[in-house]
């Protein structure tokens, strides 16, 4: 079925294999997510049963090579993120935490033994990973993290806390970033290790069909081979974050597209003052403005994907995509809700659910302010962070 939001024939810019991948993920979303997401969101339930299905779909660590990973392109990864978030950001976030954060940390910075031990099971969904960087007092400023790993003979002992860590309470392993006497290092922490506690954060207004946790690390003792040998300093976790940020460029536009289409269908069917809402000038202006931003956002996402596949994508370019597309997606979803009116505040319609989720998407992996200053630093050559 053609994309009714595609006014520029962007579909023609995709290869047959890219369109095939997109269609397979869209079919999965139609079958597995759309019929259930309102209930999951309402009950604040993450559907654990979907994890292995995502593994079978081939989207977990899909951009990685070897170890059971699919080895797909950056554009294909983006298209998968786009379609999953058209279902719900919580499900796209699972794909991101598992593949772009936890699996990428091991794939890029781990030893061969670590890759062999963890990645095949994570690719199938038999093992779940999480990524512990953010702390209660260190969000946008991870350099101020207080979690510390000290040597004790051949072992490492970790003490500290993390916050807003996706999947941690259901994960088999968590990548924990900690200060050491040698600088920031990454550790693979099996979640059944004594002293590790993950507690889901409750009473959320956003990302309700997802899990975010507080983590407490109380003298968590790890063997020497738990450290990621090739990860030293903050550059290592930032490389993983850039993978996740790239996925948001695509995913946020999936939520925007789904909201636009919900509003369009409603406006064509809903009759007021004797004619469909879609026939009113103000409604058409709203729909046009939404469609324009979706098409521009998708052009931006595709361009960044082609740069990434060519190996030339720069961090400030990822920030441009994340800042623009997440910000515009929130506005689109809110505007779509206005077309649906009072009915739009119920879970019978997707735009307000997407808008609420996007408040989290807009915040994690770098706030608007952080990405603004990354771009500003690139433009001026002057850092505003210190």
Image: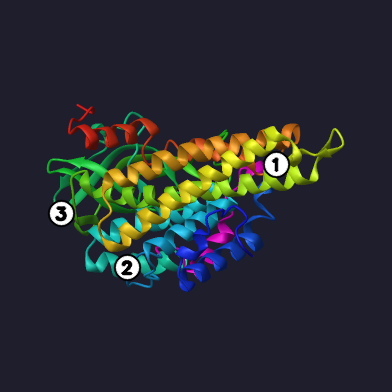
Q: Which residue is mark 2?
A: 117
The residue depicted at 61 percent of the width and 65 percent of the height is 27
> On residue 347, which mark appears?
1
Q: Could you give the CA–CA distance between mark 1 and mark 3, rounded to whole angstroms? A: 53 Å
Q: Earlier in the sequence, mark 3 or mark 2?
A: 2
Circle 2: element type: helix
Q: Earlier in the sequence, mark 2 or mark 1?
A: 2
- Foreground tag (1 vs 3): 1
Q: Main secondary structure of the magenta part?
A: helix
Camera sees residue 381:
yes
Q: Nearer the viewer, residue 67 or 194?
A: 67
Q: Is residue 101 left or right of residue 328?
A: left
Q: Could you give the CA–CA distance between mark 3 and mark 2, rounded to whole angstroms? A: 21 Å
Mark 2 closeness class: few <14, some 14–19, many ≥20 residues within 10 Å: few
Q: Are marks 3 and 2 in contact (CB under 8 Å)?
A: no
Camera sees residue 336:
no
- Foreground tag (3 vs 2): 2
Q: Nearer the viewer, residue 165 or 257?
A: 257
Q: Which residue is mark 3?
A: 154
Q: Is residue 230 above or below residue 136?
A: below
Q: Nearer the viewer, residue 117 or 51?
A: 51
The residue depicted at 27 percent of the width and 50 percent of the height is 239
x%, y% of residue 372? 33, 33
Mark 3 closeness class: few <14, some 14–19, many ≥20 residues within 10 Å: few
The span picked out in magenta is 41-61
Mark 1 closeness class: few <14, some 14–19, many ≥20 residues within 10 Å: some
Q: Earlier in the sequence, mark 1 or mark 3?
A: 3
């Amino acid at each position: 079925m053609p994309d009714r939001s595609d006014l520029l024939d962007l579909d023609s810019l995709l290869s047959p294999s890219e369109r095939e991948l997109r269609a397979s993920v869209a079919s999965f979303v139609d079958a597995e997510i759309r019929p259930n997401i309102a209930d999951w969101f309402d009950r604040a339930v993450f559907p654990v049963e979907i994890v292995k299905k995502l593994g079978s779909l081939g989207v977990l660590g899909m951009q990685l090579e070897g170890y059971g990973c699919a080895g797909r392109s950056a554009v294909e990864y983006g298209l998968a993120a786009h379609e999953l978030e058209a279902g719900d950001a919580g499900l796209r976030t699972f794909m991101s935490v598992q593949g772009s954060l936890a699996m990428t940390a091991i794939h890029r910075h781990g030893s061969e033994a670590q890759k062999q031990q963890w990645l095949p099971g994570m690719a199938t969904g038999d093992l779940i990973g999480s990524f512990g960087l953010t702390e209660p007092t260190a969000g946008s400023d991870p350099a101020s993290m207080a979690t510390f790993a000290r040597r004790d003979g051949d072992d490492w002992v970790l003490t500290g806390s993390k916050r807003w860590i996706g999947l941690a309470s259901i994960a088999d392993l968590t990548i924990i970033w900690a200060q050491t006497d040698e600088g920031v290092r990454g550790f693979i922490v099996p979640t059944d290790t004594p002293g590790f506690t993950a507690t889901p954060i409750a009473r959320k207004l956003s990302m309700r069909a997802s899990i975010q946790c507080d983590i407490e690390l109380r003298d968590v003792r790890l063997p020497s081979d738990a450290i990621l040998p090739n990860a030293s300093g903050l550059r290592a976790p930032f490389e993983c974050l850039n993978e996740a940020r790239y996925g948001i460029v695509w995913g946020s536009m999936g939520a925007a597209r789904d909201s636009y289409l919900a509003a369009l269908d409603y406006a064509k069917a809903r009759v007021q003052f004797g004619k469909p809402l879609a026939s009113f000038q103000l409604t058409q202006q709203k729909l046009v403005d939404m469609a324009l931003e979706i098409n521009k956002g998708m052009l931006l996402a595709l361009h960044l994907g082609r740069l990434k596949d060519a190996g030339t994508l720069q961090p400030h370019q990822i920030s441009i995509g994340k800042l623009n597309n997440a910000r515009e997606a929130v506005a689109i979803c809110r505007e779509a809700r206005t077309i649906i009116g009072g009915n739009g505040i119920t879970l019978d319609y997707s735009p307000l659910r997407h808008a609420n989720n996007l408040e989290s998407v807009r915040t994690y992996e770098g706030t608007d302010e952080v990405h603004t200053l990354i771009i500003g630093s690139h433009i001026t050559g002057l850092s505003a962070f210190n």
